[in-house]
Image (cartoon, helix red, strand yellow):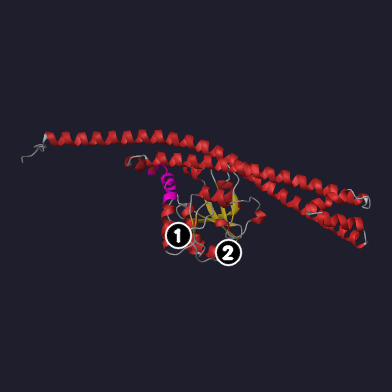
């Protein structure tokens, strides 16, 4: 080939290359457009989910408050009954035949108190105690009715939240691989967390085959096996590696499995709603899970929440693509942006 001669390239080869480039650009543009549309849909779902989760968080707080009042009211009622029983016993020992007849005719403590109320021989102080018992008991029944109403409200809210999760997962599952690749670049956690439930169920099935105790987020026991302790759970936190970005709940499940407690599966918000019952730091103990059903950090966080394990000493461990340890107050500040973080025993098991 002489100096300055141009390299001969078939026109057809250039044409094919240009078409390939255009096709690739068109595919990426279409994928981006689809991703943008799905992202807008996910943002709308996340906004709805945040609202539902906020309402559910308020309901959970009301339930916790009502349960506290019921406990206090029951204690007052028990004390009043103890005082009244002591007074009745004293009157009986003094030889009141009328009281003996009333006692024999009464079939319950409430009926006894009501019958005694009308005896001439009891003091005004006794009548006041009986009135107090009746008032406290009436208040207790009202508080229990309020609790039942709140529990029903919470069930409805959880059902609506799960429907929103399913809507988000369906939107992600329908994406092409090109779009999923773009999504992985934009928000690696979102696809992982959307698929976490399926991954958790597969891991739970494997754990069951291996003889582990497996529990779903309803608390239903699937298999039976060994248990452990707070120390075992904390030790497993340090020994269990990250299963990957976006799989915060799977790491928690693996920690408890490695500690010998079995395998509980579900997303972070599933576990939060099923097992986290308190926001009182006085009740927080090593080995408890700490979770939020939603947080504003990422789209994935808005829809699926986040979860970690309290390891004691004011520190929390969690999976963020690697295992991070941070102060409790920092964790609460970082993830309690939308709802109040709560804690409790995973699978409802109080560790010793």
**Depth check: 47 or 157 in front?**
157
Where residue 298 sits in the image (x, y, percent)? 48, 42
Question: Does residue 245 appear to the left or right of 294 in the view shown?
Answer: left
Pointer 1 or 2: first along the chain: 2
User: Does the image show residue 337?
Assistant: no
Residue at disc 2, secondary structure: helix
Quadrant of the image containing the C terminus: bottom right
Rendered residue at 62%/59% (across/down): 285
Q: Of circles 1 and 2, which is in front? A: 2
Rendered residue at 44%/34% (across/down): 41
**Depth check: 67 or 341 in front?**
67
Above/below status of 224 relative to 173: below
**Residue 242 falls in image quadrant:** bottom left
The residue that mark 1 highlights is: 241
Give the crowd class for mark 1: few <14, some 14-19, many >=20 residues within 10 Å: some
Rendered residue at 52%/48% (across/down): 270
Query: Contact, CB < 8 Å: mark 1 with mark 2?
Result: no
3D distance between C-alphas at marks 1 and 2: 19 Å
Where residue 202 sits in the image (x, y, percent)? 41, 54
The residue that mark 2 highlights is: 230
- State the extent of the magenta-drawn residues as a range: 184-198
């Amino acid at each position: 080939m002489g100096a300055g001669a141009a390299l001969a390239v078939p026109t057809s080869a250039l044409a094919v290359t240009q078409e390939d480039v255009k096709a690739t650009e068109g595919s990426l543009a279409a994928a981006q457009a689809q991703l943008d549309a799905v992202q807008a849909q996910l943002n709308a779902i996340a906004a709805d989910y945040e609202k539902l989760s906020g309402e559910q968080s308020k309901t959970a707080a009301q339930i916790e408050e009502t349960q506290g009042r019921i406990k206090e009211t029951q204690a007052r009622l028990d004390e009043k009954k103890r005082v009244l029983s002591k007074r009745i016993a004293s009157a009986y020992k003094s030889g009141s035949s009328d009281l003996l007849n009333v006692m024999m005719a009464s079939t319950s403590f409430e009926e006894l108190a009501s019958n005694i109320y009308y005896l001439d021989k009891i003091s005004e102080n006794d009548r006041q105690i009986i009135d107090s018992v009746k008032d406290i008991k009436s208040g207790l029944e009202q508080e229990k009715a309020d609790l039942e109403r709140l529990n029903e409200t919470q069930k409805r809210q959880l059902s609506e939240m799960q429907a929103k999760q399913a809507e988000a997962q369906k939107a992600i599952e329908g994406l092409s691989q090109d779009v999923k690749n773009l999504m992985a670049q934009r928000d690696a956690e979102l696809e992982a967390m959307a698929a976490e439930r399926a991954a958790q169920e597969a891991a739970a099935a494997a754990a069951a085959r291996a003889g582990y105790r497996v529990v779903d987020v309803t608390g239903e026991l699937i298999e039976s096996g060994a248990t452990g302790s707070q120390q075992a759970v904390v030790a497993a936190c340090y020994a269990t590696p990250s299963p990957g970005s976006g799989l915060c709940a799977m790491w928690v499940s693996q920690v408890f499995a490695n500690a010998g407690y079995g395998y509980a599966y579900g997303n972070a918000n599933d576990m939060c709603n099923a097992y986290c019952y308190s926001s009182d730091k006085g009740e927080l103990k090593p080995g408890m899970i700490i979770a939020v059903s939603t947080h504003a950090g990422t789209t994935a966080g808005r829809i699926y929440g986040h979860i970690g394990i309290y390891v004691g000493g004011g520190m929390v461990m969690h999976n963020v693509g690697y295992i991070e340890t941070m102060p409790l107050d920092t964790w609460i500040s970082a993830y309690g942006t939308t709802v109040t973080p709560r804690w409790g025993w995973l699978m409802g098991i109080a560790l010793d």
